[in-house]
Amino acid sequence: MGVRTGLVSVTFRQLPVDQVVEVAAKSGLSAIEWGGDIHVPLGNLVNAKRVRNLTEVHGLQVAAYGSYLRAGSVDREEMRSAVATAEALGAPRIRVWAGNVGTAEAGVGDRMAVTRGLGELADMAAGAGIEIAMEFHRNTLTDEVDSTITLLLDVGAPNLKTYWQPPVDLDDTECLQQLEALMPWLSTVHVFSWWPSNNRLPLAARESLWRPVLDRLTAEPREINALLEFVADDSPEQLTKDAADLHSWV
């Protein structure tokens, strides 16, 4: 099915929803992952429906509800609220975080709590036909590949998936190895160009990474999201340039 390009709305936390939609549409992107911190607050269903309508009116799709729920420390009421918000938004998946501590620091209790929390979330979301997808991120149990795969297998839910993004300062070869290992469970890639550390660059500055990543995603028979995030200078103009490069590589 190919790669669906889009935008992570938290890239432009400073902009209201209607401007985020306009920037994404102008840049030729197809979808938006709406963040739960600013644009689509948890539990505000009227707002979520409004955001869905604005997205669709501009010919775009909702890629995900980017929640900030942390599995293992979320009660069932928050889970239900997240599922209801995602339904109102028309989101096919909810992005969540795998706990509050990194793999190296996590004890047995931490991992058990996160595993149980992911299972509960996945079960609740399945009733609404929604996926749960874990953010691949430092200071969580998805800060490296083996731990991420262990979570996926231990939970064993068919609607539990994972994201991937390039870890800070990891070279291209290791990034591609990570991507390949996670491919069976991969729903979405967050696309940005940081180097070194968290210095934001135009996307083209890491063409040596992103061209082979997108080639690999394109080879998959299913649709995978490639969502632009954290553009240089938080600039809508830079997003348009990055989107043009992204589309030229897909």
Image: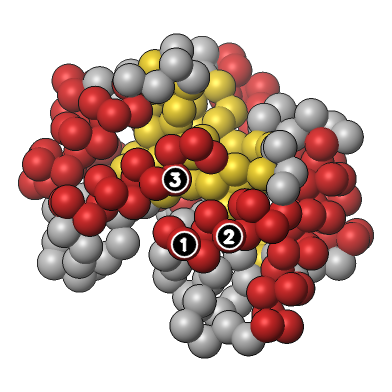
Can you say which quadrant of the picture contains the C terminus?
top left
Q: Kindly identify which residue carries mark 1.
A: 146
Instruction: Reply above or below: 167 against 247.
Output: below
Circle 3: element type: helix
Q: Kindly identify which residue carries mark 2.
A: 150
Answer with left or right where residue 164 lies relative to residue 86: left
Could you tell me residue 120's position as x and y percent? 83, 55
The disc labelled 2 sits on which kind of residue?
Thr
CA separation in Å, label 1 and label 2: 6 Å
Residue 52 occupies quadrant: top right
Task: Check if mark 1's residue and mark 2's residue have beta carbons within 8 Å.
Answer: yes
Of 48 and 133, the residue lying toward us: 133
Could you tell me residue 171's position as x and y percent? 16, 58
Residue 182 circle label? 3
Residue 168 occupies quadrant: bottom left
Q: Earlier in the sequence, mark 1 or mark 3?
A: 1
Packing grade of label 2 (10 A; few <14, some 14-19, many >=20) is some
Task: Check if mark 1's residue and mark 3's residue have beta carbons within 8 Å.
Answer: no
Instruction: Reply above or below: 248 against 119.
Output: above
Circle 1: element type: helix
Q: Would residue 184 be visible to someone looking at this image?
A: yes
Check the image and tell me how it is coloured: secondary structure
